[in-house]
Each structure stands twice: as structure tokens, then as C-alpha cells.
Amino acid sequence: MTDLSDLPPARPWRGSALWPAAALLASLALWGYAVTHTDVSDLGDFGLVGALHPTFWAGLALLTAGFWFTLRGPHRHPAWAPAYVVGLLVMERATQAVVYPTPLYAWAWKHDAVVDHLLTAGRLQNADVLGDMAVYDQWPGFFAAQAALVKLLGVDSAAQFMAWWPLVSSLLLLLPLLLIYRTFTEDRRLVWLAVWLFCVANWVGQDYFSPQSVAFALHLGVLAIVLRRYADGGSGANGPGAGRPGVGGSGVGGAGGGQRQAVWTVLLTLLVVAIVISHQLTPGMLVASLAVLFFARHYRDKVPLITTAVIFLAWCLTAALPFLSATMPDMLRSIGDIGGNVATGYGATPTGTGAVTTSWVARLLSGSVLLLAVAGVLRQPVLRHRALPLLLLALAPLPMFAASSYGSEMIFRVLMFMLPGAAFFAAAALLPQVRTLAAVEAQGARPERRRFVWLPLVALLAGTLAFVPSYSGKDRISHFPQAEVDLVRQVVDKAPDGSLVVAADRNYPLAFADYWRVDHYWFLDDARQHVDLIVGEPAATLARDMASVEAPGRAYLLFTQGQFADAEMNGLLTRAQLDRIEKSVAASPLFERVAGNSAGSAYTLKSAKEAPEPKEAPEAKEAGR
Amino acid sequence: MTPQELVVRMLPPFGGWLALSALALPAGSELRGAAMIVFLAAGPGAALVRICGPALSARPAEGPVERRDPAFERHSDLLERLMLIVFLSVAVVLLVATVFIATHAFSAQRVLLTLTLLTTVAGFCPRLRASPPRTVKGTAL
């Protein structure tokens, strides 16, 4: 095997099309059978993993093996690899949309509430009206577009289509990813294997209905354009225009080159503005990525970097200023605190066999892909040289560890932004060594070594199968049955303006519903000292905490299975403690049960006047918020 | 103008007007949804890319060091166009919706009408012609 791209052109496809088609169709058929025979009504500690019909695993393994052999086969048709990757995305990202009757993730439901707020208010509002939730009105791009989409489709809310968002956003990512990889290699095997590895290693779950999902795709789109169109000497560095005077290069080519570059810059600016108005973190990551390219002198054109930085700053100093000025002291404190920024925070300690196991599988998957990437960098000196910008882009997000904790999520976001580059080199580690044409001519074509040829397939299979527990192993937390949605909806719809909805934590559907008129309080967000008080004397303490609601508002207390699953599996409280709290409330004369079904119960505080006097200083609770 | 050019020029605006007329269909209907999604995901971007096309492709893009497949570069350029069509559409939808919500003038119909009008205007705009690349001394190659 010489350079990976010098395989014979694939033409005799027709005779060899049978088995790739059969394997793909068989795997999709197995998936179809699995999702129609999967019962998610009683998820265990392993989430969807424990509930999936065994044919799902057979289908996924067959798909992976089929992809590998299609990729490696000498008579491969170029269309099979994309077909298999789309098949992978369907199995990975559409399974939950098919098997669950309601959308997953409390965060997705929160974003649905923001869309609902924009539709109700018809304008952006500030913290005086919305409190902490005003931050979404300062980066409204995604939500405004979704508000328009909801109305144009004529549906009641984004909840009706947001379950399919992971599939849509993952398909969106394919376009820039392919372009980026095709900038550095012509070898389709390397390109598609890198795309596959990216898909299976991207388990962090930022593909859900969120600004991050769209901003990440646009971020990769900007990088693809910069890598292809803003290189030193245009196509001169790598391409056929090398050495030709006047071809490409932003500073070369006179008026014609300047005009062309201006057109690209206008389009780039549109994408950057869309990113900046939609998401806080992504513009920072984009600036870091472009700066790394610029300072590494591979891409000396400063226009993309300056354009992005100026637009980002302009937004931060105008529309986003209220949020940034309020959080600036905390942000400044977290600069340099790498340990604190990397920590995943209180309430994120996996508890129980299922949560611990799936957490470790996820860590192992990410660690393996990053190690493979290191192996690829070390083993493939030719690629390391040719795709150096991609290596730099993989490293660019790392300094963000020192910048902020991003709500205890920085480690996951950094991992996600590193993946496009890391997946490329990880794929390179699984394929034969690339050699230059000169080396091939000097040494002759070497036959591929036959030893351990099965290892890459095993690694690919292991990684692909490990994606499922990493991505959906905690679905007991993320999935809310229809009964839970109905219960919360019933409470919120009944709540007069100015009411307060109290719950153990925010892990339930519609947790932020009507947040512009109904306040929320999650007592597990409090300091441990106050949580202990609630556990010790539940009804009396909660009644005191809820007593400040003024008429006509009412105070509701909500216990649902989503909160219990989250509290248990993230080490906040044990099941026994939660049961004790609910029993105490149910038995207390201070509360009245107003709604309930198989997914939980809702209580209301009978009268604020009946609440007992506080036994603690009020600062203890406030301090924990 | 060839019939093919006319189709390429007028298809995005047609998609917009089709989406506008689809508002008359029942709320939540699949046909209405398809008309909306196709236009919002591709219409504005396609109109923009049509205008900028010649200028964008005036010089070859950066590519792999060793090129053996003559079609590879063309396929990459096509992929780039497809990405631009989709991503620019998404970006324009985000921008227009944000402008309306920020100016207290938000309604979904206004967003769609504005996008359709912009796309229609773009359909009547001439394409940006690529100036011939010149050397530093100013002589055309």
C-alpha cells in the first residue's frame, strides 16, 4: 500500500453492489425491528441500553462491519460510504425519537419554553422581567428562528418536532466535516472513516434542540471556508496553483483577487453573525481556532480572525452587555482556575451501577479516540505535515479550560470542539501509512502488512457500540413519559400569575414553562446545609420556603419521576430520602394534593399564613441559590 | 439566458412564494411543513450563491497535496456550494427572525414574506462576474 489515495479507480461496481446493499438494508431492517420491539415504559439504571431489543446491537454491528469492508474493498462505489454513515446517524440519533413518545432532556424542554416566551412576548425582554432566563434573550438567534418555524409549520410548540433535532443537526455537520477533511486528503477511506469516528465519539449530547447544535455546524462551516479559501497562496500551498503567480492569496491578485476575497468575506460574515447572535461560547471557540491558524502562520490572512473578533466584541458590548456585566466578576474569578473549570460540579456525581458504568464507558470512548488521534499523529508523519492546520484546530479549544467553567460543562464542550481534528488523526491511525510519491518512487510499492488487519475493525466496532451507552445510558434521567408531561402541564396551566412552582430539581419536562409569569425554585440547588434541613423536616421547611408567594399567586410543590431519577443517579439524594420528603408533604396539613398520576404528584401550600416560623437564618437558603 | 439559467434563477423565489401560499393549508399539515422547510433550508442561500457563484469559483480552492482524481476538486466544489446554500439559508433565517424580534415587529408571516422578497430581489440581480486574476504588475494571466 502506498499513499492511501492511489487505490484503483472504482468502476466495476455493479457486480460488487450486492453485498454492501444487502448488509446496509439488513442492518436497517434489524434496527427497524428493534425499535418497534423496544419497551421504554420502565427504564432501568442503564437507560435505553437495558431496554433495547437485542436486534439493535446486531444491526449496529452489521452496519459497522459492512461500512468497514465497503470502505476497504477494492471495488467500492463512492456512494456506499455516505449511505452507511447516514445509516449510522439514523441508528444513533433517530432511535430515541422513534422509541420515546416525548422529547428527551429537560434542557430541550427549557429551550422550548424560551421559544414559547418569544412567541408570547413578541419581543426581547431583560432581567427585570425574566430574571436569570433573560440570558436567552441576549442571544436570541436560534430561538427567534424556531419561533418563526413553529408558527409557519402551524404546530403548537417546538416540542412537536424537537425530538428529531439530533438527527437533523448531525446531518448538518456532515457537510462542513467532509469539506474540511477533503481539504487535506483525497483518500475517501480516510475521509469517511474520520466522519464515522466523529459521529461515534460525539456522544456529549449537544446535538439536541439547542443553539449549540446550530452554532457548532456553522462554526465548522466557517472553518471549512477559511481552510479552503483563505490559505496562503490560495491553492498554491497544496494545490495545482502552487507557485503560480497571481493565483489566490488574499494579498495577491490585485483588484480581482481583492474582489473575490471580499465576496467570500461577505458570506463568511453572514455565518459569523448568525453564530454570534445565537450562542455565547461558540464565537469564543471560533476566535481561538482562527487565532491558532493565524499565529501558526498557515493562514496569514487576518480578515476571518478580525471579522469574527469584531462582530463578537460588538455583540458582547451591546446586546449581551447586561448578562456579561452581571457575570463578569465570576468569569474573571474563573480565569486560570483550570481545576475548577474542568470539574463537572455539584449534582453531577454518577451514582449507582448504571450511571457509573455508562459514565466510564463514555470516558473510555473519548479517551480511546483521543489516544488513537495521538497514535495517528505519531504514526503518520506525512499526514501530520500535510494536515497540520487540522491538528492545530484539534488543540485550539484546550486553552478554554483556563477561561471558564461554562456552567461545569467546559470539559464536554472542549471535547466536542476538539473532535473534528481528533477524529481525522484517529482515523489515520486505523489505516495504512501514507507515504509521499517521492518515497513510493524511491522505495517501490510495499505490500500491506497482513498482521493485525482485524484490529481496526475491532476498534471501530467497540467504539461504535460504546456510543450507545455513552449517549443514551442515562435516559432514565432524560426521558419523561407522557404522564409526567401531562402532570406538569396541568399544574402550570392552573397556576395564576405570580405563582411559584417548587420541585426537587429542574429535571422534568416543562420545568421552565411560562417562566415569565410563574417563578420556579428547585431546592436541591440550595446549599447542602439547607437541603439537610429539608430532609430532616421536609413539610415544615418547604412550607416556610414557599410562604412568600403573594395572592393571587399560589405555591405548588411538584414531585415527578424525572426529578427522582436525576437526584438518585447524580448523587443528590437517595431514593429513601426523596420518598421521605414526599411522604412528609403528603401527610402534612400544610399541603393539599391537587394533581397526580403514575408519573408523580403535585401539591399546593394551603395558606402561607399557616407556614411555621423559620428556625434558621434566611441567608442560609439564599446563599445556596 | 438559457431555460436552465432561468430555472436556477427563479426556483428560490418560486419556493418562497410557494411557502407563502402553503400558509393557507391546514396547520400542521405535511405539505405545508415540506414547503416551509425546503424554502427555509435552501431558498435564501441558493439565491445568494447564484449571485456570488462566478466570483466564488474564480480561483481554485485549497486542496490535498497529491491529486489523482480529476473529479475530486469538482466534487469538493459542489459540496462547498451545497454547504453554502444550506448554511447561508440558516444564517439568513436566524438574522431576519432576530431583527424582527429585536424591533418588536415579530410575526412568522413577516419573516417568511421578507425572506421571499429578498430571495425574489436576488433572483433579479445579475451574477457577480469574476474579474480576471492579475499579477502584481497588473497584467492579466
Image: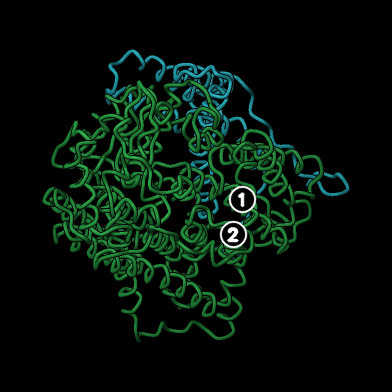
Residue B36 makes an appearance in the image:
no
**Image location of residue B123, percent across then percent down:** 56, 22
Residue that carries the numbered disc 1 in the rendered image? A284
- Above/below status of A70 relative to A157: below
Residue that carries the numbered disc 2 in the rendered image? A400
User: What residue is at 32 percent from the left and 39 percent from the top?
Assistant: A612
- Above/below status of A570 relative to B43: below
User: What residue is at 21 percent from the left and 33 percent from the top?
Assistant: A486
Q: Quadrant of residue A21?
A: bottom left
Instruction: Assign the N terminus of chain A to one quadrant of the image.
Output: bottom left
Q: Chain of mark 2?
A: A
**Image location of residue A144, percent across then percent down:** 48, 29
If you read the primary sequence from the N terminus, does the residue marked by circle 1 or circle 2 appear first?
Answer: 1
User: What residue is at 29 percent from the left and 19 percent from the top?
Assistant: B27
Image colouring: by chain
Q: Give the alpha-carbon distance from disc 1 to disc 2, as whole Å.
A: 9 Å
Horizontal placement of A329 versus A135: left or right?
Answer: right
In the structure shown, which secondary structural element does the residue marked by tag 2 occupy? helix
Residues beneath discs 1 and 2 located on the same chain: yes
Q: Which chain is green?
A: A
Residue A441 makes an appearance in the image:
yes
Q: Residues within 10 Å of mark 1 (few under 14, many from 20)?
A: some
User: Tag 2: residue type?
Assistant: Met
Q: Which chain is cyan?
A: B
Horizontal placement of B118 versus A543: left or right?
Answer: right
**Image location of residue A5, percent across then percent down:** 48, 68
Q: Answer whether labels 1 and 2 touch (C-beta < 8 Å).
A: yes
User: What residue is at 61 percent from the left and 42 percent from the top?
Assistant: A326
In the structure shown, which secondary structural element does the residue marked by tag 1 occupy? helix
